[in-house]
Amino acid sequence: MIDVIDVDKRWGATWALQGVSLRVARGELVALVGESGSGKSTTLKLINRLAEPTRGQVLVGGRDVMAQDPVALRRTIGTVFQRFALFPHLSVAENVGLLPRLLGWAPADTLARTRELLQLVGLAPDVYQGRFPRELSGGQQQRVGLARALAARPALMLMDEPFGALDPITRGKLGAEYRRIHDELGLTTLMVTHDMVEALLLADRIAVMAEGRVLQVGTPRELLAAPSRPFGPPPRPPRASPRRPARPRKTVRKTMPKTARSAWSVSAPRPSPSSSSWRA
C-alpha cells in the first residue's frame, strides 16, 4: 500500500530524512515512534505530498505520488491531526460532510454518510450533528475529526499524534476504538506517536526513528525482545552528593566555676599516723 524507497529530505541546510525506506502492507497499522525531530512527521507528510522528497521515491498503491495531482491525492487519503482542526463556524454534520460535498455527493448521501460515521465513532447523530465544536469536549472533537477523515471512504489513513492532546483515559479509549474501526473497515494506517505504550498496544508493526533514519522495524514482540536502542531517554548517572569540608574541632577547655576552684584549692589535712584514726 505504501512504499517509501531510500528517501532523503532536506529543509534548507538541515537534513530531516536520510535514506529512509519503509513498507506498509495493505490492512496494516504501522506506528512511527521516536524522539522529537527524528523525522516521523516529515515521513508522514511525504505520503500525501504535504512535503516532497529531495531524493528517492514514495509510492501509494503502486503509483508514484509525485506523478499525481496533490489535491486529488489528498482527497483519497484520510488524515487525522493532533489539534482536531475542526472548522469552528461549521456544525458537526457540516464538518463531517465537508469532503463528500466537495466531491459532489448528493445531499441525501452526504447526510446518510455523516450519520453513519457519527454512530461509528460513538456520537449519537440526533444529539451531536447540530452542535458546534465549541460545544464539544476534546475527546468529542477528536471523534468528529476521525469521522471527517473517514467520510469519503478512504483506504489509507494518516494520523499525526491523533490522541496526543487528550487526557490519558480518553486517549486510551479512543485508541482502542480506532483499532476496532481500522479492523472493521479494513483500513491501512500509518500513525505517528511519541507514546511507546500506545504503539505497542495498537500497531501491527513499529518503526523506530532517530535523527532522520529508520533504526528498526518489527512487531511489538520483536521490539520488546531485541530493541535496537533503549526506549526513552538514557538514564542519568547518579549525582554524587557534594561532601562538606570537615569542620576543625574546637578544643573546649572545661573550667570550673570560680567558687568551685576556691573550694578545692585548700587541701584537707591528712591524718597523721599518731592520730586516733590510724590506731588499730
Image (cartoon, helix red, strand yellow):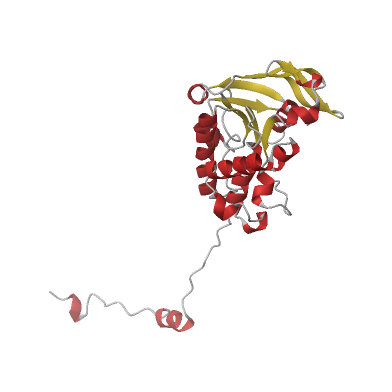
Q: Where is residue 157? Give x, y as percent.
A: 64, 31
Place of residue 75 in the rendered image (x, y in percent of width and height, measured from the top left): 73, 32
Write the residue at 52% across / 23% down.
219
Front residue (pair 14, 148): 148
Quadrant where the C terminus is found in the figure: bottom left
Frontmost residue, 40 versus 226:
40
Query: Seen from this angle, which residue lies furthest left?
Result: 280
Quarter placement of the N terminus: top right
Residue 195 relative to residue 49: left or right: left
x and y percentages locating residue 215 in the rendered image: 64, 22
The image quarter in which residue 15 lies: top right
Residue at the (50%, 34%) spot, across then down:
180
Quarter location, residue 275: bottom left
| Residue 126 position within the rendered picture, expressed as x and y whole percent measured from the top left | 55, 53
Residue farthest toward the right in the current orientation of the protein: 12
- Above or below, 61 against 195 in this view is above
> Residue 249: in sight, yes or no?
yes
207 or 153: which is nearer to us? 153
Q: Nearer the viewer, residue 218 or 2?
A: 2
- How many numbered dots are placed on residues in this image? 0
Left or right: 84 as drawn, with respect to 251: right
Residue at image position (53%, 39%) is 175
